[in-house]
Amino acid sequence: AQKITQTQPGMFVQEKEAVTLDCTYDTSDPSYGLFWYKQPSSGEMIFLIYQGSYDQQNATEGRYSLNFQKARKSANLVISASQLGDSAMYFCAMREGDRDDKIIFGKGTRLHILP
Amino acid sequence: DAMVIQNPRYQVTQFGKPVTLSCSQTLNHNVMYWYQQKSSQAPKLLFHYYDKDFNNEADTPDNFQSRRPNTSFCFLDIRSPGLGDAAMYLCATSRAGLSYEQYFGPGTRLTVT
């Protein structure tokens, strides 16, 4: 079974609109960490945001926020006021407490921002 | 700046000819990872080192080997590259721990002719 599921292979969004990228995860470990990475066409993987399983508040980093719904095992990335430079692949990833040296990636969502 | 460096950025090798990709880091992170990424796919973890401990993924072909002679350097050896091994190879580092993100190198794009 997949541990990280990203159900949107691709999305098209108008510039300046907000966009939500979906991510659900599966773990029985009470301790885990969730990450989002951005990969532009140039290929480099860029860390965006982190959410810990015990964090009480949703993580935010500038225009990025993570909508963490623990009971639903959901960790959606919200990008506010999208920009053309946000066009990229976005990957959701997870570390689990029993193997915190290993990160599992989802299959990714390709986001296209339209002018 | 502290960073993860991969050399070369582009590598062309012939079918069956061994090739070595290198990764170095100045972050002093104890974990180093090698991923294979094919077009429009997620990075696939091949193996990782937690300090000197080598962790191989179950589905990583025997054709892929790795060495970590010290904290700073890690090598990926492909003993007999096939056409299916053409991909981007990403090196990443991190501290072990739930909250630590990975730092990625720019990748090496491998072409097999």
Image (tube, grey):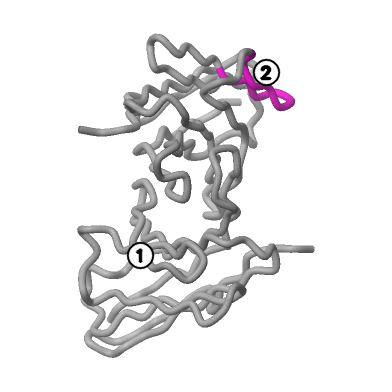
Q: Position of residue A25 (x, y in %)?
A: 36, 25
Q: Residue at x 38, y 68 (%)?
A: B54
Q: Nearer the viewer, residue B57 or B78?
A: B57
Relative side of A87 to A26, left or right:
right
Chain letter for mark 2: A
State which quarter of the image contains the N terminus of chain A. top left
x, y percent for residue B87: 35, 65
Q: Residue at x 47, y 39 (%)?
A: A89
Task: Kindly indicate whether the residue at mark 2 contacts the one at mark 1 (C-beta within 8 angstroms).
Answer: no
Q: Name the residue carrying label 1.
A: B87
Badge 1 and badge 2 both on one subunit: no
Considering the numbered disc 2 on the image, is that residue within a helix, a strand or a loop? loop
- Magenta stretch bounds: A57-66
Q: Position of residue B33 (x, y in %)?
A: 46, 61
Numbered label tally: 2
Q: Nearer the viewer, mark 1 or mark 2?
A: 1
Compared with A50, A81 (above or below) is: above
Picture quadrant of residue B11: bottom left
In the shown orientation, is residue A113 left or right of residue A11?
right
As rendered, which of B90 and A2 lies closer to the eye?
A2
Q: CA distance from mark 1 to mark 2?
A: 34 Å
Looking at the rendered structure, the kind of residue marked 1 is Ala
Q: Quadrant of the C terminus of chain A?
A: top right
Does the magenta run of residues contain A45?
no
Callout 2: 10 Å neighbours few (<14), some, many (20+)?
some
